[in-house]
Amino acid sequence: MAAIPKPGWHPDVRDAFKLKKETYLAMSSEKEDIHCGLNGLYSTARRSGTVPLDWKTGSSCLPQELFQARPRKSCGKPRTCWENYVSELAWGHLEVPPEQLEEHKDEKALISLCSRRRAHTLSVLFILTCALVYVTLLEETPQDTAYNTKRGIVASILVFLCFGVTQAKDGPFTRPHPAYWRFWLCVSVAYELFLIFILFQTVHDGRQFMKYIDPRLGVPLPERDYGGNCLIYDPGNTTDPFHNLWDKMDGFVPAHFLGWYIKTLVIRDWWMCMIISVMFEFLEYSLEHQLPNFSECWWDHWIMDVLVCNGLGIYCGMKTLGWLSMKPYQWQGLWNIPTYKGKIKRIAFQFTPYSWVKFEWKPASNLRRWLAVLGIIFMFLLAELNTFYLKFVLWMPPEHYLVLLRLVFFVNVGGVAMREIYDFMDDPKFHKKLGQQAWLVSTITVTEFLIVVKYDPHTLMLPIPFSVMQCWFLGILLILIWTLWRFFIRDITLRYKETRRRQQEVPVDWDRQLGNGGPAAAASGRSKLNGSSETLRQRKS
Amino acid sequence: MAAIPKPGWHPDVRDAFKLKKETYLAMSSEKEDIHCGLNGLYSTARRSGTVPLDWKTGSSCLPQELFQARPRKSCGKPRTCWENYVSELAWGHLEVPPEQLEEHKDEKALISLCSRRRAHTLSVLFILTCALVYVTLLEETPQDTAYNTKRGIVASILVFLCFGVTQAKDGPFTRPHPAYWRFWLCVSVAYELFLIFILFQTVHDGRQFMKYIDPRLGVPLPERDYGGNCLIYDPGNTTDPFHNLWDKMDGFVPAHFLGWYIKTLVIRDWWMCMIISVMFEFLEYSLEHQLPNFSECWWDHWIMDVLVCNGLGIYCGMKTLGWLSMKPYQWQGLWNIPTYKGKIKRIAFQFTPYSWVKFEWKPASNLRRWLAVLGIIFMFLLAELNTFYLKFVLWMPPEHYLVLLRLVFFVNVGGVAMREIYDFMDDPKFHKKLGQQAWLVSTITVTEFLIVVKYDPHTLMLPIPFSVMQCWFLGILLILIWTLWRFFIRDITLRYKETRRRQQEVPVDWDRQLGNGGPAAAASGRSKLNGSSETLRQRKS
């Protein structure tokens, strides 16, 4: 297909052409469905009034030959043929250039159209059966009950993953492959069930249970000495007066940076990121009487963390977001690209998201969104605190691999969950269910917090310093007052002003009406009209 | 809407109007999507050539005003308003009477359209959190580790059910409610994981593990005396010569009847039911050297079981099937029915299936279907045998409630699985994945069999009597020969005959061609034509 000059689309045309998921799904297998999808596209474009003048068909429907159109039967590569077919139809009949169509298609629908024939349900079933036959019948069963129990549980989890990765419901993300996100969904189910199990044990049993995962766990953590000298320039140390500064430059600096980079990609909003970042430092201040490793120097809190690590992470994240929302999304299949360089680039692109939804949280637009955003910030901070408290109550050393695995897990599921929450909040007409991953992440965060409360109520009940209490009270009061003002008082004021404005306008209307013969005459005229129309109707029937 | 005389539809029109799931989904929320759905309907009807002559619009598309149509905003009952709206549109613009439209709609799509706003994801999340807070924080934790472990596992399963019932993928069935079928899906996942766990234990541990479920389990079954006197009329017993007959009239007679009634509803085919029923009696004969409770008198096998219990069950099942496939399917919402009697009837109807797919297995139509039907019969018989062998190897008394629960479970999941297998086999273009429930039921059947093999290889390896071996060998050989003949040899013969028939017809064509100037002239003429068109194209470009 040669490059054609883009017709003069209206700026809104990108949105107008946004194909609804269903419309695209409707293109699936039948001729009339393709027609449907294209007609949907067409009527959207028509309604938006942005159709170029040289539109091929003048009527409100697609040309007749589209009914006779048939997909090419003998196309070798299932993944790409349909895309080409549909885009050619769209180009030929609607003059929608392929680039436009490409940008807004739903890859999930396409995958289900083209590559679902390669769904590996039967092959996974076969391989699973073979593995079970081998392990249970051909291998000698060990006589150790504890070992067998552990092995049985691990096998159950693996079978659950096999089931879930092939059969679970798809989420909003498709790249690099929907199965990848189904995998993380199943992992979150397994993690949640593990947490529930831990929650129902006694404190001692729960801590000792960790020994089954790693025998080195289940021993109390050594007390550490935090805080200390906070001078940036320490004149007492003559060899290196900046030693306090260098001490803080450990592996947590890149970790903080990377963490906030990913969090920015998850939240996709500069203001929310900054608020959460600053709030977390406040939380560290407030909770340093409970967890000693929250106590840091003032410059560590505000300069190192908020400004340098988090700020730089958020900045890079926002830059990446800008690039992602501007980048031309290629959905061209691998087989269609002629050059090797292009193919390699396409493979790399498979690890970038398929399409990008820019989050616009708009917390102040109405009360529901405001409460939702407050709730999201609250849950986000709770999940962050859980990282520290959970390892404290379960006696996990901070450098243990399980702590890292939990973070990797949250990076993978957090993005899906945030997208699902955004969809649920932003488009409740279409997303009537809270997404499955969002549901699970909420449950996991709550369960983790309950474990913390159950395992160490003593630490959580340590009396909060009076100054901290005052600050929090003030903060919550301010939020409450703002909420009241913004969504209740301001509305009433505006409505009152509106009423007054109308009352001032009425006399003008009054005068005009008087000039036209007075209201009585108008009313009688109206009644006359009604009367005549009524008689007309009676005569007709 | 007044009753209108049905236009003269073609007999095929019912199929033609069968709305595809996507087309209906496409009617969801946007104006153009409704248009789409109706257009799909229209073009199907048009293609089938069965549109009545007085079709309102002559062109190939719907009238323009449909583009301006908007759903009524203020309809109070979300469940029914859309149905009415769509059916009115269909009636007004396409003259599809509502009865026709009603019959073929997809209730799942409608539920997702109308009642999804009542999806209880958030409320389930809230109740779950409250329950967890109450049980873990407010109740005193017991100090008994074994009890806590059991409680933790039960709680994990319950949380999994909460997740699954609200969030799992829907299956093919919708009545009485999709959540009911999601529940059974989650139960089958839990059961499969339990089986996997049992499979990985040693034989002794596995049997003792059942003690955790019921402390009375885990003890060897008492030996029972089966078989005995097989005389129908026993002259030795003077008080009641028919006592052998009365002895067999126990609770298993209604159980067999009910079982086969349900199996018929699951399989939906008279021949397959009869084959499985007879095959199972053969299996009982063949395996009575392994499980003594398979040994029955000849009249118990063939008259009591096959003819009376199974036969009557299959007969009643087929009658019900006939009623189900003829019954007028009402999808009218509860709120739309004016009378109380009608409302009660509608509630009762909620427990009958929404629509009914008549299974046409057609095993002889091609090799793929034949192998699939053989595989289904094999798995079905395996699942039936597992019932007996599993309770034998796990030391379960036949009257234990777990045995009954397993049957209730299979009744609920078997129907879904069979429907999914049928869809996968019958319409692979649309159902590209084996259904989730079918996948699970297959895995469960295989895992149960593996447990039987692992727990009692001795019984399974008991030497098969030579006569039984001969019978099975003969049977398999016959099936093999029939398969070879039907799908390989017959095809070759047919193709050979076809070739010969054509060869006999060729000389006639030859003569005709000669009359027209011979093949050489025709070829040169064609090349001339090609040449001229080529020059024409060159001139044009």
Image: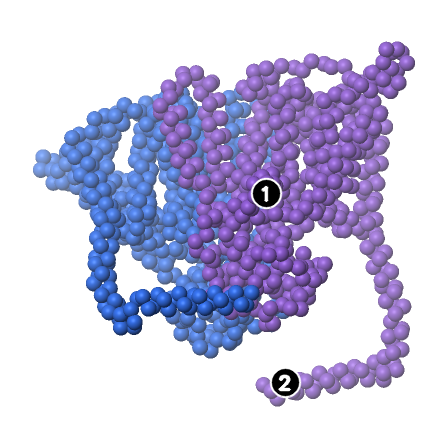
Chain colours: A purple, B blue
User: Is residue B273 left or right of B440 when viewed as pictured?
Assistant: left
Residue A6 or residue A305, whichever sits in front? A6
Give the answer, above or below, for where B520 lies relative to B22. below
- Please tell me the numbered disc located at residue A342: 1
- Give the image location of residue A206, x and y in percent: 59, 21
- Please tell me the numbered disc located at residue A537: 2
Q: Residues within 10 Å of mark 2 (few under 14, many from 20)?
A: few
Is residue B370 at all visible to an observer of this figure? Answer: yes
| Mark 1 vs mark 2, CA separation in Å | 72 Å
Location of residue A289 by image quarter: top right
Quadrant placement of the C terminus of chain B = bottom right
* Count of labels in the image: 2
User: Is residue A288 left or right of B459 when viewed as pictured?
Assistant: right
Residue in view at x 16 percent, y 35 percent: B470
| Amino acid of disc 2 | Arg
Which of pointers 1 and 2 lies earlier in the amino acid sequence?
A: 1
- Give the image location of residue A120, x and y in percent: 45, 40
Labels 1 and 2 positioned on one and the same chain: yes
